[in-house]
Image (cartoon, rainbow, N blue to C red):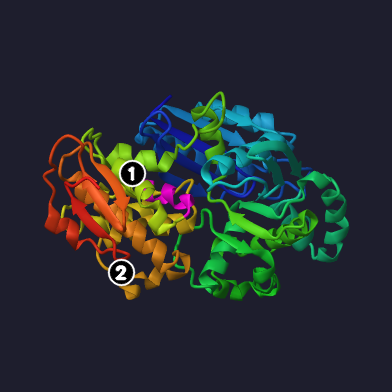
Amino acid sequence: MAKKTAVVDLGSNSIRMVIFEKTSRYGFYTTCEYKRKVRLGENSYNNGKILQEEAMQKAENALRFFKQCSLKHKCKKIFIIGTSALRDAPNSKEFIKRIKTKLNLNIRCIDGKEESYLGGLAALNLLSPFKDATTLDIGGGSSELCLIKNNKIVSCISLDIGTVRLKELFFDKGKTKSLDQFIDPILKQIPKEFCNHNLIAIGGSLRAISNSIMQKNSYPLKNLHDFRYDLEEEREHIEKILEAKVDSLANFGIKKDRFDTIKKGIFIFLKIAQKLNTKYIITSGVGIREGIYLKDLLRPNNRFPVNFNPSLKSLQDRFLQEDKNNHTAKFAMQLFNALKNIHKIHDHYKQSLLAAAKLCHIGEYLNFYFSNEHSAHFVLGGLNYGFSHKEKVLIANIIKLNGKKINPYNLEPHKQLLPNFHILSWLNFILNLAKTLNNTNESKINFTVLDNTLYIFNEFKELNLPKEELKKIAKPTSIALSFNQKP
């Protein structure tokens, strides 16, 4: 597979291009993203869905620019995908031929079900684990729903309701009183099996809603991907945006380029959420573009290997040279298991501890001094996929603590996302004990706990341990450390 791949989403509202860079077999990250608000579907819904010349010219100009960018980034592959506006248009073939003739670019127009599937594929692989959910991707011309049950994509549908479509057919003509009459029969197309308490929100309108809620609540992370909220708790705020005057939308954190479509998006969102009996919203920062890339990357199974995380692997590939003498992760797992009867922490936290152990040395790539703080920034900025916000914050903070005694004031920015003091203290202790032991260049160390004493030894030889450094690590309890003695 190509090292760099460009994926272009030719939507009704915007044209976006994302460039993905592969770092190993399944490791990858986003190199850059470009967007042009072309409105390919503009004025088409009032004119028999025919693409208008002005919109087609804007799209052509955008694709010419995107091609130049992809060549600059040395992309070996470029996928261009047409969605609702293109598949609806009677003159779509003429436009596709025009782009092929003028720019030598191939556009593949996909149907609504495939568009839905690609969004579901991205969410299933790149969100933190969930079992059942229905995805909703609200676009300019259509809305796609994908049903996921038991971690598998079960069914996909597409509805002919989108923000630009509603804008031109109803809002621009002052016919908003006819909206319910238009949308209710379309909602009846949604099968009952799609009803789900979890709704995965994909698309610009839904991300704009989530961003507004995060700002209102002074949420401690800026990451939209995997942000979750209770719909009933935030319904009043969402409805305030719906009722707000256009010139006051900025007060809700809505960006100017969303002013003319956000209300249409909220209207569709609330209608579909009601139909699905939605309770909880999971925001997805990924969608059709990531779905296209993953379908190419993961074929034929379309799933990552068990216990594999692409962003963690990508960070390791880019910034941590393979070191067979690095045993921090191994020691951390041994210590967690040896101390289990004392710390009594749920095994759920082993995943976060393991990720922290794998990434705790990454800050040294930037600078040895304050490397723990640099590592924490790498985690918050680069561990994009497969981890919940709570897990990311936990991983970053136990790395940043670096074995020091916990100062509650320093935890304040992320306090609402962190576990209790007991869990944090133990993970801080275990990680930094493992990290310090790794610096001894010893590969085989035994850990045994007896009578509240942790024995650190080797069966066959005496270990050269930095006892003073080990004793400096803040202990979560009155546990004693014994060196080079068997219990």
Closer to viewer: mark 1 or mark 2 = 1
Q: Is residue 156 above or below residue 234?
A: above
Viewer-nearest residue: 75 or 294: 294
Q: Residue at x 60, y 74 (%)?
A: 247
Question: In the rendered view, would you say 93 is above or below 211?
Answer: above
Q: Is 210 within the magenta?
A: no
Instruction: Give the residue at x 70% y 73%.
Output: 243
In the rendered structure, which disc, 1 or 2, sits on the residue that comes first in sequence? 1
User: Start and end of the magenta stretch?
Assistant: 346-354
Please name whichever residue, 476 or 325, is drawn nearer the observer in this view of the structure.
476
Indicate the secondary structure of the residue bearing disc 2: loop
* Residue 405 pos. (x, y %): 26, 68
Residue at 68 percent across and 59 percent down: it is 265
Image x and y of residue 258, in percent: 59, 61
Q: Amino acid at mark 1?
A: Gln
Secondary structure under the numbered disc 1 in the rendered image: helix
Is residue 102 toward the left or the right of residue 88 in the image?
left
From the image, give the main secondary structure of the stretch colored magenta: helix
Q: Identify the amino acid type marked 2.
A: Ile
CA separation in Å, label 1 and label 2: 23 Å
**Closer to us: 347 or 46:** 347
Is 350 within the magenta? yes
Which residue lies under the disc numbered 2? 406
Picture quarter with the N terminus: top left
Front one among 396 and 45: 396
Q: In the drawing, does residue 348 fall left or right of residue 428?
A: right
Would residue 254 be visible to someone looking at this image? no
Mark 1, residue position: 334
Q: Is residue 426 left or right of residue 88?
A: left
Q: Quadrant of residue 50?
A: top right
